[in-house]
Image (cartoon, rainbow, N blue to C red):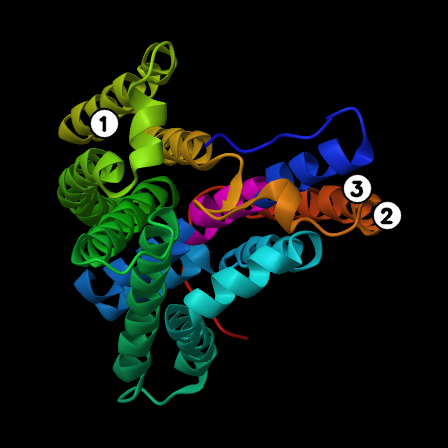
Amino acid sequence: MNPVIPDLSTPAGWLPLVFLFLMALAMLAYVVLDGYDLGVGILLRRAGSEAERDTMIAAIGPFWDANETWLVLGVGLLLVAFPVAHGVILGALYLPVALMLIGLILRGVAFDFRVKARAQFKPWWDRTFYAGSLIAALSQGWMLGRFVTGFGSVPLDYVFAAATALGLTAGYALLGAGWLLIKTEGELQQRARRWAQGAVALTALGVLAISLATPLVSERIAAKWFSFPNILLLAPIPLMSAALFGVIVLLLRRFPAKGWHWVPFAATVGIFTLAFHGLAYSLFPYVVPERTTAWQAAAAPESLMVIFVGACVVLPCIIGYTAFAYWVFRGKAQALHYG
């Protein structure tokens, strides 16, 4: 049965849509921005020397903590704008959320303590940073898979969640390798190229497997994908994704292509954006898949209006200082020094 959509000319109609868009924007920004520094953390164990690990840390040092702001914003919007959905989602995902937070805490502690540790203990903190990054990435992928299936309990739902966890982790590794192609040079940059070549194959396999499995775990999504004219409107997403994968593979084979170091990372961001667009289209208008729509889960229109005014102030500030930080720390990562 199709969900009932209220009159969109009233605040009760359009405000939930606005907050649904803002929440989606925050989560996409988090996946892309924190995704690449999680990816660098996942790749840290593969560095050839301590100097390379230092350079990898320096490549994300000015950004990684601020990138997590988008996660706080997204979850905060879920809490204040869709309190009913917040309770259902966080209740169903209690364990993976706890694991993700443990992973993020490990990353933060390791990032600071590796600075102060004695030489013999520094590799342990590097391993801790790697472990925290891997735990956070796998937990986020598992949560996404469970969310898409509406927290179903049949074996296929758990297999889908596990595949999503592996696919998202591979995608983060590809983002991280792409970021290192931009921020590093020399032997480390060549290592990043090889890491990207391995990660792009795993990411493509993960995207393909998840795309094939999604209509199998949700009859509603299957009907939405393969009905006419929806199938024609959705066709550009897999075609454009395949083209972007082709661009990444081609450039990595011919690397270094002068002036094109940024393209593999940008193409990976494009793939994530297309996948996110397809996911958002598939799930809309549900906040809790197959259970609760945005309008059913939304807070009172009067409350949403107050929060909307606050969001109009806070969101430009977050975008502004994020853009400023990336502008200030543009260019290649410098040698790591601690004063």
Give the CA separation, mark 1 to mark 2: 45 Å
Q: Find the distance from the CA under tag 2 to the CA under tag 3.
A: 16 Å
Residue under the point 23% across and 37% down = 207
Residue of label 3: 312
Assess whether residue 10 is covered by the magenta stretch.
Answer: no
Q: Secondary structure at mark 3?
A: helix
Identify the residue under disc 1.
Answer: 245
Magenta: main secondary structure: helix
Q: Is residue 122 visible in this depiction of the protein? A: yes
Q: Is 251 in front, or is 100? A: 100
Q: Is 261 displayed left or right of 242 in the figure?
A: right
Q: Is residue 151 above or below residue 327?
A: below
Callout 1: helix, strand or loop? helix
In the rendered image, which quarter is residue 85 located in?
Answer: bottom right
> Which residue is rendered at x = 79% and y = 41% of the image?
312
Label 3: few (<14), some or many (≥20) within 10 Å? few
Q: Quadrant of the N terminus?
A: top left
Q: Who's the residue at 33% across and 44% down the image? A: 175
- Is 30 contained in the magenta span? yes
In-front residue for pair 52/308: 308
User: Which mark is in front, 2 or 3?
Assistant: 2
Give the mark nearer the N terminus: 1 vs 2: 1
Q: Which residue is mark 2?
A: 302
Residue that protrudes farthest toward the front in the picture = 1
Q: Looking at the picture, how far across and down is residue 126, in whole percent?
A: 30, 75
| 1 or 3: mark nearer the eye | 3
Left or right: residue 17 versus residue 211 is right
Q: Which residues are magenta?
A: 24-34
Please name the amino acid that badge 2 sits on: Glu
Q: Amino acid at mark 1?
A: Phe
